[in-house]
Amino acid sequence: MAIERVQKILANMGYGSRRNCEELISAGRVKVNGKVISLGDKADSEIDRIELDGKTVKDRAEKVYIALYKPRKYLSVIDENDDRPNVRDIIGIKQHVFPIGRLDFDSEGLILLTNDGDLANKMTHPRYGHEKEYHVEVKGRPDEEQLAIWRRGVVLEDGYRTQAARVDVMRSTNDTSWLLIVMKEGRKRQIREIGGRLGLPVYRIKRVRIGTIKLGNMKAGDWRHLTKQEVAALTGKKTAP
């Protein structure tokens, strides 16, 4: 017997990230043996009947791992009530995949999609600390004080203090500068808010790396399957020689 929290079971079966599955449970859409469950309830997937929206859940088989260059003006969050284009519209594969983490509507660059709930949890949970690297265009030329504050951490509007980050100037013109930013967290619109608070309005954000996966020479709208070696590097599992 393998008794686990139902949100973990659903995530492992490919029904979304663990957070997405928690939302399904909180919305009352999940039943175990005919009874609506609450967040935190457990089940044994081998003997209990688990239903989502009245249909018995099934393991969605083969795990899929995709790297995509998200263009600007595409949603990274899958929302059936939002008519704007989203990242899943680009790839058009039969498997039901979901994005790991977010990249806001006006930003572009690398995003990962999968049906592996365990990996999604590892990639988004703060304790695992996967680095994310960005190229960011800001207004003006940041001085040493602005860079030092950004590197140490900035208190956001909600009172949260950001973690230390690497922030380097890549190049500058009279009007704008491109920054290289590496951080291990990713709160909603964090880079844009920090830039605004430091007097460096953000014009453009491009994510070029997540953990060991790099955007490379991909162009907006390009996507590819991750190699076995790349998946192993993300999951921490060894591949056969």
Image: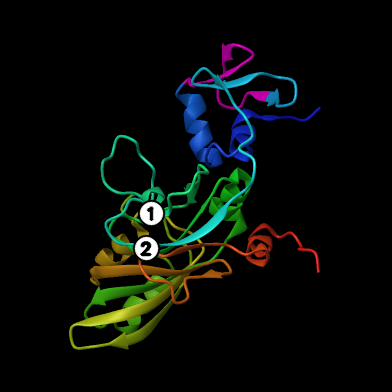
Residue 105 position in % (x across, y down): 30, 55
| Of callouts 1 and 2, the N-terminal one | 1
Specify the amino acid type for callout 1.
Answer: Ile
The image quadrant where one finds the C terminus is bottom right
Q: Quadrant of residue 58?
A: top right
Horizontal side, residue 128 vs residue 19: left or right: right
The image quadrant where one finds the N terminus is top right
In this figure, which residue is indicated by the disc labeled 2?
221
Q: CA distance from mark 1 to mark 2?
A: 7 Å
Specify the amino acid type for callout 2.
Answer: Gly
Range shown magenta: 28-42
Question: Secondary structure under badge 1?
Answer: helix
Residue drawn at the location 60% of the way across and 11% of the way down = 34
Question: Is residue 124 found inside the magenta-colored segment of the image?
Answer: no
In this figure, which residue is indicated by the disc labeled 1?
90
Residue 106 position in % (x across, y down): 27, 59
Residue 94 position in % (x across, y down): 50, 44
